[in-house]
Image: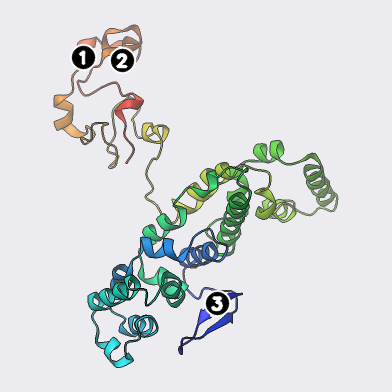
Amino acid sequence: MATNITADGKTEEKAAFVSKLKEGRERFLAHVIEQGLEIGRRSPDDFIRHFPPAAIMNGLGSHANLRSQILVLTTGIKQKIAMKKSAQSAGDDLQIALDEGETDSDSIVALFHPDDRVRYLDAKKLWAYVVEGEFWTVSATKREDFERAKAHVAFMLERALEDKLLTHRDIVDGISVGELAVRLPKDKLGKIIEQALSSGHEKKPFTEVELLTAMPPASIVDYVSLSHIWESVVVMKIARAHGYVEATGETVKDALDWLDSSGRKSDHPFATRADGAAAASGDAAASEAGPSSADTSEEGDAILDDGADDGDKDKDEVEVTDDDIRIG
């Protein structure tokens, strides 16, 4: 149960939040933000730091009724006056009330409905708020934070399944059967094998669905590294796949995947040099690029097409190392 602020300013217990948003990616984000607040992974102060009064009111720019609901209960202004306020004026008034201690972050966030946060604020900025602090890397020695991190990651996986952002197979493939086999205790693994064999004898399927029923996310996080789950499932299967982050490379390996077979930099729009200049591409860049050092080495000769002479090698073939790549 959570606390809700009623129209007359009183507090009451409210039922667990259930998003009414139409799209799964929106429902997922609304639930993850709300759960983060409920378990203390994030605080109202964190939210207001990312989305100050001006950002909230600008987000609600064309919805005077929603702006006025927040203003009336946080600043004491009359409803009719609040309805006449522009988004900028409403943001100014709310900021003044916050600065002067007439309201607080808890009240503002409680009045900003979880679905409305997702409807009217930028999804990528909301995701940045969710992941700030890289909580999945917390040490197990910080027991309270670690337990909170495990609960949050497990909730994300379960919620993503519920909202159909990924499948059971996505989770198992992301973590990998090999990793589960190494990390799960023998007794847990033994029970899963027994269940799989029993299903086989009864000619029933034992798929990723049955595997995650036997070992749900809330149990998996007790044994598998949170960092591994985060990178292989949350980032790859949820955040990138559903547009919470730009689907661009975040490692040197990813950047090198944008090289063509001859070692040239491709037209990857986010590839840049380490000094900040745009990555070379096209004829203009090719005309400025000289032969690589590989042209005069045995290895350089080996990669020339059909044994062509060094002089016949295209001038736009340059050697690219990890240091030449800066990830956007």
Rate crowding at label 1 as few (under 14), some (14 to 19) or many (20 or more) other CA atoms within 10 Å. Answer: few
Query: Residue 3's mark?
Result: 3
Rate crowding at label 3 as few (under 14), some (14 to 19) or many (20 or more) other CA atoms within 10 Å. Answer: few
**Residue at image coords 51%, 67%:** 34
- Of mark 1 and mark 3, the one earlier in the sequence is 3
Could you tell whether 183 is left or right of 199 in the image?
left
Q: Residue 297's quadrant in the figure? A: top left
Determine whether label 1 and label 2 are within 8 Å by CB: yes
Q: Is residue 197 above or below residue 262?
A: below
Quadrant position of the N terminus in the picture: bottom right
In this orientation, does residue 141 appear?
A: yes
Query: Residue 16's mark?
Result: none
In this orientation, does residue 243 appear?
A: no
Name the amino acid, label 2. Answer: Leu
Name the amino acid, label 3. Answer: Thr
Q: Is residue 143 above or below residue 51?
A: above
Query: Residue 312's mark?
Result: 1
Q: Which element type, helix, strand or loop, lies under badge 1?
A: helix
- Of mark 2 and mark 3, the one earlier in the sequence is 3
Quadrant position of the C terminus in the picture: top left
Name the amino acid, label 1. Answer: Asp
Question: CA separation, marks 1 and 3?
Answer: 74 Å
- For label 2, the residue is 304
Q: Residue 186's quadrant in the figure? A: top right
Nearest-to-viewer mark from 2 and 3 = 3
Rate crowding at label 2 as few (under 14), some (14 to 19) or many (20 or more) other CA atoms within 10 Å. Answer: some
Q: Which element type, helix, strand or loop, lies under badge 3?
A: strand
Looking at this view, name the residue that lies furthest to the front. 100
Q: Position of residue 200 (x, y in %)?
A: 81, 49
**Residue at image coords 64%, 43%:** 224
